[in-house]
Amino acid sequence: MWIKACLNGGRPSPAPITPDELADAAEKAAEAGAAAVHVHPRDADGRESLHGDDIGAAVTAIRAACPGLPVGVSTGIWMTGGDPRRRAELVAGWRVRPDFASVNVHEPGFADLVRLLDGSGVGVEAGVWSPADVDALEGLPLLRILVEIIDVPADAAVAAADAILRRVPEALLHGENDACWPLIAHAGALGLPTRIGLEDTLTLTDGTPAADNAALVRRARTVWTDARRKHENTYG
């Protein structure tokens, strides 16, 4: 299996915030089985940031703690108040570049930012939230596609994911909050890569608070593996 740890997102504590906290969380997540990490670096005031100094500090700290572990960052347009031009300017100014960056397909400036990142040697994960988003992917240089199920209740998560996966069967599948654990299991049944971490959920499968990202990674590996084994036993 292949699992990425999403260490913080826009959440406050207990999610890691500072470069040192992110590095420690990344090291523990990798020890628990994460093959890569995705982070939202912060500025001195704790706000999500695309500024080169903030990106560089987080990426450098994680690489020092976890040599060889791929490090990715968000490019969420909310960090520039919805301004795609300002986002592109900040990304173009990165001196320390992550291994990959996620770009949401539905956000303004998506295709231009994909080309900018690819041209600077940063792999691009395209965040697909709906079947309609798939049309925008054609011809773009992408590292991987993320099928992301956002603001969907648990009992509707699998159907929402399958509606997208019918168009992009090779993708990393994950959900947030109530949709998180059902889609970890669905990814396992389908043999797809997935992600887990405090960005996506604060709780384990039984509803108890997760101690940290590493605890979520360990539990996700079990859920994914159990679902994969069940699928193979059922369908051969």
Image: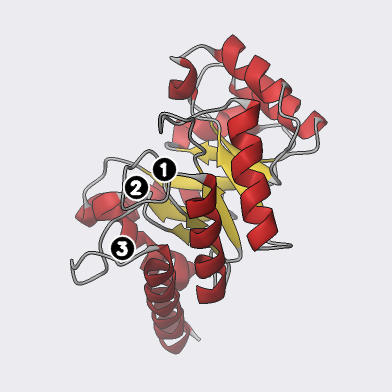
Task: Look at 55% across and 74% down and name the residue there.
Answer: 31
- Residue type at the position of mark 2: Ala
Q: CA distance from mark 3 to mark 2?
A: 12 Å
Which is nearer the N-term, disc 3 or disc 1?
A: 1
Q: Which residue is mark 2?
A: 160
**3 vs 2, front mark:** 3
Determine crowd level at label 1: few under 14, some 14-19, many 20+ residues with C-alpha closer than 10 A: many
Percent of width and height locating residue 2: 58, 67
Q: How many other residues sit within 10 Å of disc 2, few (<14), some (14-19) or many (≥20)?
A: many
- For label 3, count other residues whose C-alpha is less than 10 Å away and answer few (under 14), some (14-19) or many (20+): many
Q: Which residue is mark 1?
A: 9
| Residue 79 drawn at (x, y percent) | 46, 23
Give residue 206's position: percent from left, percent from top.
19, 72
Residue 196: image quadrant is bottom left
Distance, label 3 to label 1, CA atoms, is 20 Å
Q: Residue furthest left?
A: 207
**What residue is disc 3 on?**
182
